Amino acid sequence: IFTSEQKNEHFYNVDKEIKVQGTILEIILEPRYQGSAPFLILLLEQDESKNKYYVEVSPTWFFEQDFHKGEQLSVIGSLYSGQGNTWNIIAREMQSKGKTMILRDKRGFPNWRGGQNNRQMRKKGKRY
């Protein structure tokens, strides 16, 4: 889905933040870096427009929520264009099943900075 060139070029841009609500069409576990956990990517179809977005969530070890095809999801994140006619969102915040998940701070810095030990701190409600 994402070429190595795209991975190096994209970054969180607060000026391109959007909110999208839709249905999960596909769940993808994409290897990003050799020797590290795969990255969780969700293919989301927007409810109103039927536009499709690849939503970059986080490394799989950081995420504690299970997702299933057909579930509703609301995402706030930074929009950037992908290959061809695809659109990608780097997720900052997601809502599903009445739960809000904070993945990045307001400036777009990932909450998984510091590695897997940070997950324990996030569970206690601390945000970095």
Image (cartoon, rainbow, N blue to C red):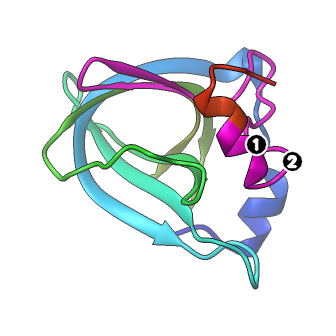
Q: Is residue 103 visible?
A: no
| Magenta highlight on residue 101 | yes
SS at mark 2 in the image? loop
Residue 48, quarter of the rendered image: top left
Given residues 31 and 25, the one toward you in this image is 31
Give how far across and how far down residue 112 sits, in percent.
Answer: 74, 44
Give how far across and how far down residue 99 sits, in percent.
Answer: 35, 21
Residue at the image position 56 percent from the left and 61 percent from the top = 83
Vertical position of residue 43 compared to residue 21: above or below: below
Residue at the extreme left: 70
Q: Name the side, left or right, on which 16 lies relative to 98.
A: right
The span from disc 2 to disc 1 (Cα, nearest Å) is 6 Å
Q: Residues within 10 Å of mark 1 (few under 14, many from 20)?
A: some
Residue at the spot of label 2: 114
Q: Name the side, left or right, on which 64 lies relative to 98.
A: right
**The C terminus - image quarter:** top right
Given residues 23 and 122, the one toward you in this image is 122
Residue 81, quarter of the rendered image: top right
SS at mark 1 in the image? helix
Q: Name the side, left or right, on which 55 lies relative to 77.
A: left
In the rendered structure, find residue 118 and report the number of the disc placed on it. 1
Residue at the image position 79 percent from the left and 42 percent from the top = 11
| Magenta highlight on residue 12 | no
Q: Are marks 2 and 1 in contact (CB under 8 Å)?
A: yes
Residue at the extreme bottom: 34
